[in-house]
Image: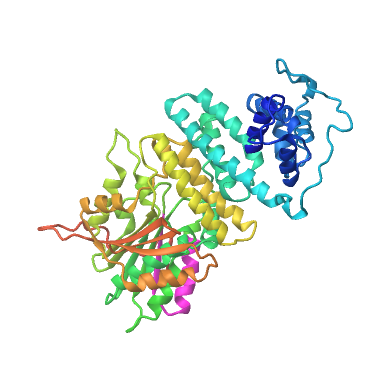
């Protein structure tokens, strides 16, 4: 801005003073030429007026220049006046439309008006800005603006001003065309804009498009393969279960979300190598009913039974079909008092945190009957996030930060298309539920480890320290992924996996606190033979 300030001083005093203390016009012309500009100091006033007009157009009618800003890359212009004129022309505004009182602008300059002043030296000329640098700066500015608008829109939704929220959504959708939506903030913003749009424009459809059970299982599988989060959850829980089963000849694992049985081949193989021989392993897998009438749980059990047979592990499987985890009752599990029981919950307990004034809290009921089973160990893995806040804005901003880190970490894994897209759809459905849904329809009620610790201790559980073996296994797992930003950390006997400094999931293990005169709740005796069980 300094040349403009100097020119103003020269213009106002050039005709009345020739003092050596004031920079002379030809000296300023030399400075401009040194910087590579083809313009005289006497013309800068007109250029400044045109720039002011351009600023007014951009502020008051941004759409007039939107197509130009998104398509053009502006380098360092040497002919300032022509450059500004081209921008104004792009908005269909001619120079004759400029209306500055008392100013006459020459639209037809004479031949000597724009005489090129040779630069003092070639080295002094400012090099043009790199194309990629300019594009990156423009995208960064648009990304920052998108984040600001997302938070403003969430504030409007919280106030109930849906008309303003809808207007902001339309603005964000237009701004989204200026950023790369294939990665970074552009991708994250796109998913959150879509979720806000569903909440504001089609609230009647919210909660009805969560996808079928088959689709969810398919996306779960792609997310499992694309990044280390679910593998970390499975390996950490398996190591804790393996150590808890030490010395027991009959063990029973109750899995709250079977999902293709991806977790259990590793445990079966580890039990096969146990000194003294493997135990009898019973596995009860809970999952949704098959929409096509097939007994998909039994099919998974058969595949696991075949693996167990190949490594000489005695194995029995029982499938329990339930649309919701709270629909499962203890008698369905057929637990025997002679068994060492492990209850395994991978990102499931948060779905029970919804409240209904007409019934008891589902999470309290579930933890109560889990405790009555007197399990040897309860393994819990949950998202290390706080998406269960009552206020929408606070929940929204926490989710925006959390999933930005999640997408960054997924991008760094280098998964190939279309697997990467399907893995992202798994996360997108979580975002949609957090942002769009309320009441019982909102099931993605993630809470941090500190809250789970308090809740489980109040329910009669005490923490089990995840040992060094679990930490070593988790650290070795990360070597399978090329990204260097993943971090495993130990926190009060629990393990977290995160991206750089942000923990994203937390694994913990628990045992039942002994209570005086506690009575164990006996369920049905061991019953393995049924239509959905498989024996080896």
Point out residue 141 in the picture as x, y percentages from the top left corner. 59, 41
Identified at 76% across, 43% down, the residue is 33
Point out residue 473 in the picture as x, y percentages from the top left corner. 41, 72
Residue 369 seen in this snapshot: yes
Residue that protrudes farthest toward the right in the picture? 111
Q: Is residue 303 magenta?
A: yes
Q: What number of labels is visible?
A: 0
349 above or below 278? above
Point out residue 241 in the picture as x, y percentages from the top left corner. 33, 68
Residue that protrudes farthest toward the left in the picture? 517
147 above or below 407? above
Q: In which quarter of the image is the N terminus?
A: top right
Q: Which of 469 and 56 is in front in this view?
A: 56
Identified at 75% across, 33% down, the residue is 84
Q: Is residue 510 magenta?
A: no
Point out residue 54 in the picture as x, y percentages from the top left corner. 69, 28
Question: Residue 521's quadrant in the figure?
Answer: bottom left
Q: Is residue 185 left or right of residue 68?
A: left
Question: Residue 11's quadrant in the figure?
Answer: top right
Q: In this view, does 451 lie to the left or right of 71?
A: left
Residue that protrudes farthest toward the front in the picture? 19
- Magenta range: 298-320
442 above or below 125? above
Identified at 66% across, 41% down, the residue is 178
Residue that protrudes farthest toward the bottom in the picture? 276
Question: Residue 476's quadrant in the figure?
Answer: bottom left
């Amino acid at each position: 801005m300094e040349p403009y300030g100097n020119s103003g001083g020269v213009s106002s005093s050039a005709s009345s003073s020739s003092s050596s203390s004031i920079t002379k016009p030809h000296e300023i012309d030399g400075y401009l030429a040194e910087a590579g500009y083809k313009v005289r100091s006497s013309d800068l006033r007109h250029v400044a007026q045109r720039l002011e007009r351009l600023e007014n157009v951009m502020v008051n009618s941004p759409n007039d220049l939107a197509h130009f800003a998104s398509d053009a890359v502006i380098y360092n212009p040497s002919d300032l006046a022509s450059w500004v004129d081209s921008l104004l022309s792009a908005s269909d505004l001619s120079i004759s439309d400029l209306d500055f009182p008392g100013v006459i602008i020459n639209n037809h300059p004479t031949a000597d008006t724009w005489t090129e002043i040779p630069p003092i030296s070639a080295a002094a000329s400012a090099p043009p800005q790199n194309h990629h640098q300019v594009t990156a700066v423009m995208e960064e500015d648009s990304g920052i603006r998108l984040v600001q608008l997302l938070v403003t829109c969430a504030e409007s939704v919280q106030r109930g001003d849906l008309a303003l929220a809808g207007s902001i959504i339309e603005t964000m959708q237009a701004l989204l065309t200026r950023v790369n939506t294939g990665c970074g903030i552009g991708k994250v913003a796109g998913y959150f804009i879509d979720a806000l749009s569903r909440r504001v424009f089609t609230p009647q459809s919210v909660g009805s498009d969560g996808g079928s059970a088959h689709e969810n299982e398919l996306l779960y599988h792609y997310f499992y393969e694309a990044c280390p989060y679910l593998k970390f959850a499975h390996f950490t829980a398996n190591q804790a279960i393996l150590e808890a089963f030490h010395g027991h000849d009959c063990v029973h694992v109750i899995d709250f979300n079977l999902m293709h049985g991806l977790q259990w081949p590793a445990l079966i193989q580890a039990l096969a190598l146990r000194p003294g021989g493997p135990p009898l392993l019973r596995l009860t897998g809970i999952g949704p009913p098959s929409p096509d009438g097939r007994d998909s749980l039994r099919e998974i059990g058969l595949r696991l039974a075949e693996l167990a047979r190949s490594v000489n592990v005695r194995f029995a499987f029982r499938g329990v079909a339930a649309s919701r985890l709270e629909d499962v009752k203890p008698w369905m599990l057929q637990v025997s008092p002679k068994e060492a029981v492990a209850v395994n919950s991978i990102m499931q307990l948060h779905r029970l945190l919804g409240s209904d004034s007409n019934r008891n809290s589902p999470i309290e009921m579930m933890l109560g009957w889990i405790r009555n089973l007197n399990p040897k160990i309860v393994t819990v893995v949950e998202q290390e996030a706080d998406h269960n806040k009552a206020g929408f804005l606070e929940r929204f901003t926490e989710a925006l930060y959390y999933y930005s880190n999640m997408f960054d970490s997924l991008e760094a894994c280098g998964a190939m298309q279309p697997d990467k897209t399907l893995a992202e759809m798994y996360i997108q459905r979580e975002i949609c539920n957090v942002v769009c849904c309320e009441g019982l329809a909102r099931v993605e009620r993630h809470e941090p480890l500190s809250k789970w610790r308090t809740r489980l201790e109040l329910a009669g559980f005490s923490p089990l320290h995840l040992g060094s073996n679990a930490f070593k296994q988790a650290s070795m797992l990360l070597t399978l992924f090329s990204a260097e930003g993943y971090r495993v950390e130990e926190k009060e006997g629990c393990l977290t996996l995160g991206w750089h400094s942000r923990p994203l999931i937390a694994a913990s293990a628990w045992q039942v606190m002994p209570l005086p005169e506690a009575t164990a709740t006996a369920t049905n005796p061991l019953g393995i033979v049924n239509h959905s069980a498989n024996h080896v």
